[in-house]
Image (tube, helix red, strand yellow):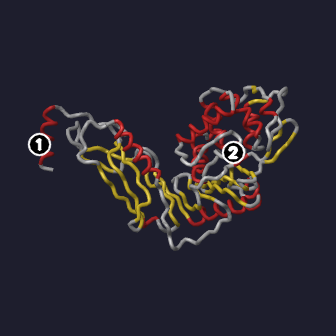
Amino acid sequence: MNFILKIMKLWVMLIVSLVITPSFAQLPTLSITAKSYTLLDYQSGQTLLSQNAHERYEPASLTKLMTAYVVFSALKEKRISMDQVVPVSTTAWKMVGSRMFIEPNKPVTVKELINGMIVQSGNDACVALAELIAGSEDIFAQLMNKEAERLRMINTHFMNSTGLSHPNHYSSAHDLSILASAIVRDFPEYYSLYSMREFTYNGITQSNRNRLLWLDPNVDGMKTGWTDKAGYCLITSAKRDNRRLISVLMGAASENMRSKESQRLLNFGFQFFDTAQLYKKHQHISSIQVWKGSQNKLNVGFDYDIYFSLPKGQSEKLKAKMEYKQPLIAPINRGQEVGMVRFSIDDQQIAAYPLVALEPVDTAGIFGRAWDSVQMLFN
């Protein structure tokens, strides 16, 4: 029985994650020059536009978003601190590729390493942080993969903290959009670091490689990447009028192309889609029948805010259909799933979310249960 319940819970999680924007003939087509891309609305979690988004590609330095996620988790759990001095190993010092130029005999703090990792894309900073938290980069990669699994990044596997090429090091545009959203959601206190335009360490000033930080005032993150095999990659986050969009572009032909095409993705999403909050967390949506309980009606709603992104002018076509588990028999716990709301446009389902109990319902006394048992025979 426990196994069946786990499978049912997983199925509900999959349904919740299946939020699909249907095809609309009136939307203009947008051709993006890249191997893979996706455009995500942060509030609704909906994919607005994508191509090859679930294909596995080398992520290059986009990897460093997961490195940062693990580091931010360690900070939140107080396993490390921002002002902590970090020893620099020979391995970290000799890292190839982009570096912040740390040295074995020069003190460096966690905060400096994080800035070097995010702004300067320092491979040496990543390895130093990995060794601090896990003892070695190999063990740190295991922590990265554990977080990827928890976030349901099903087409992702990490072999290192830097993004250097490896046959078993890969991710997808869709998975990286999940990760970018998780950083914005889970670590707002650190997200502002991704908008830093330059950082100086060891007398060397390096600029952030995300050109859109200079070109678009709405862009406030996130990360660039490049290797010969991966091509030019960019994850961008922008906020306009309380809407946040996240674009992931992989495999562009040049640095200029990745910026240009990412900007086009963001402009498309902001121009042709609206996002609205339909329901608030714990808002009373409906009341349903409860049997054998201390009360015969149960208030239901959602465990989180419900947002929807739709093409401009299409919101009036959105329809909701509520389905309830029947018979619903007490006791009922607060937060217990008791039904489903399915949203559709033109008879095409675009999302489904579980309804939950907004209040507990205790079991009725012996006479109340007996009376409801009789009533249920005739319903």
Q: Amino acid at mark 1?
A: Val
Residue annotated with mark 2: 166
Q: Are marks 2 and 1 in contact (CB under 8 Å)?
A: no
Residue 374, image x, y percentages: 11, 42
Q: Nearer the viewer, residue 351 or 272?
A: 351
Where residue 233 sits, quadrant-wise, is bottom right
Instruction: Kindly give the residue lying farthest to the bottom in the view shown.
Output: 26
Residue annotated with mark 1: 374
Residue 326, image x, y percentages: 25, 48
Q: Circle 1: is it few (<14), some (14-19), or many (20+) Cα within 10 Å?
A: few
Residue 373, image x, y percentages: 14, 41
Q: Amino acid at mark 2?
A: His
Q: Secondary structure at mark 1?
A: helix
Which numbered circle lies on residue 305? none
Where residue 342 sits, quadrant-wise, is bottom left
Instruction: Kindly give the residue lying farthest to the right in the view shown.
Output: 203
Q: Is residue 249 visible?
A: yes
> Residue placed at 71% from the left, 41% from the top?
162
Q: Secondary structure at mark 2?
A: loop
The residues bearing labels 2 and 1 have C-alpha atoms spaced at a distance of 67 Å
Quarter of the image with the N terminus in it: top left
